[in-house]
Amino acid sequence: MKTAHSDYGKIERILINTAAHAFISQKKIDTEYARLNYLDRPIIDGALSEYRVFENIIAKAGAEVMKLPQKDNTSIDAIYCRDASLATDFGIILCNMGKTDRNVEPENQRAFFQSQGVEILGTIDAPGTVEGGDMCWLDEKTLAIGHTYRTNYSGIEQIKAFLEPKGIEVFVVELPHFRGPSDVFHLMSIISPIDKDLAVVYSPLMPIYFREALLKRNYRLVECPEEEFDSMGCNVLALAPSHCLMVEGNPITQERLVSAGCKVETYNGDNISNLGCGGPTCLTRPLERIV
């Protein structure tokens, strides 16, 4: 069955924003990276090389890859295209970004989706804020959404208004202050579904009620250790059930995934992931999967 309501099924169609289109030039990177709270300055040549490998892995997995066109009005953060939208079986919900430097991205995605004949279900309006990294599908009828500095209650209520009348449960996850408003801390910083009953998690920042809900749903939990949290060991993209992609440099989490029966592929994300704190789930907006 084809559906947008999955974060583990085989990816059939996926949206990306390439490093070439998002970073554009070293001058643009140099102008923006500090203001956007990157850990350090990405190097454009390294980013382009890393992204080619990343894109090839996704293409080899059999996905139809859709690429956003270059837009001069976006910041380098636009490479993390998941955050601007949510794909549903009823159409795309365009987000309203909690990080104000990114507020043009949803409208850019709207124009692209419309040009491709992709239906738009609706838009999150101010004062509501929602970012795609705060949402993941636990199953085809359950969307988890984090209440964070990037996704507020008004935005959550708008997501509910779009989806609950269509029979979708919206499971709200209250996340902690952690490192504060300037940090990129999304729901998917602490959970990545890998299969219908398997997820990578970072339990120290996971609310007890949410962790218990996953166990009640018969999820097996692959624990990301503390020493691999900042290197995005918990940010893992399922290319297909139990076939996943993660950033290099997380050997403990990788071995735990292999022990759980997963095929694991990795990429060097020094410039496209590590410095901007955006792993493979952040770099992609899956639009359709097979479950």
Image (cartoon, grey):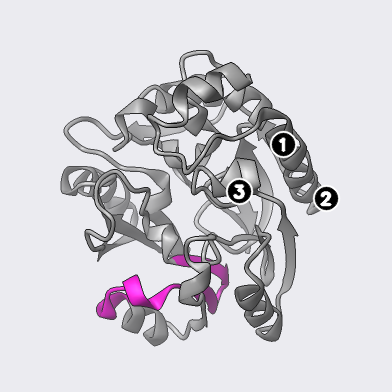
Q: Earlier in the sequence, mark 3 or mark 2?
A: 2
- Contact (Cβ within 8 Å) of mark 3 with mark 2: no
Q: Quadrant of residue 18?
A: top right
In magenta, the rendered stretch is 191-210
Q: Position of residue 223 (x, y in %)?
A: 50, 80
Name the kind of residue labelled 3 in the image: Glu
The residue that disc 2 covers is 60
Residue 59 position (above or below residue 143):
above
Spot occupied by residue 53 in the image (x, y as percentages of width and height): 78, 45
Q: Nearer the viewer, residue 251 or 119?
A: 251
If you read the primary sequence from the N terminus, does the residue marked by circle 3 or circle 1 appear first? Answer: 1
Q: Is residue 281 above or below residue 190?
A: above
**Residue 169 occupies quadrant:** bottom left
Reply above or below: 172 against 22. below
Residue assigned mark 1:
46
Q: Would residue 168 be visible to someone looking at this image?
A: no
How many dots with numbers? 3
Q: Secondary structure at mark 1?
A: helix
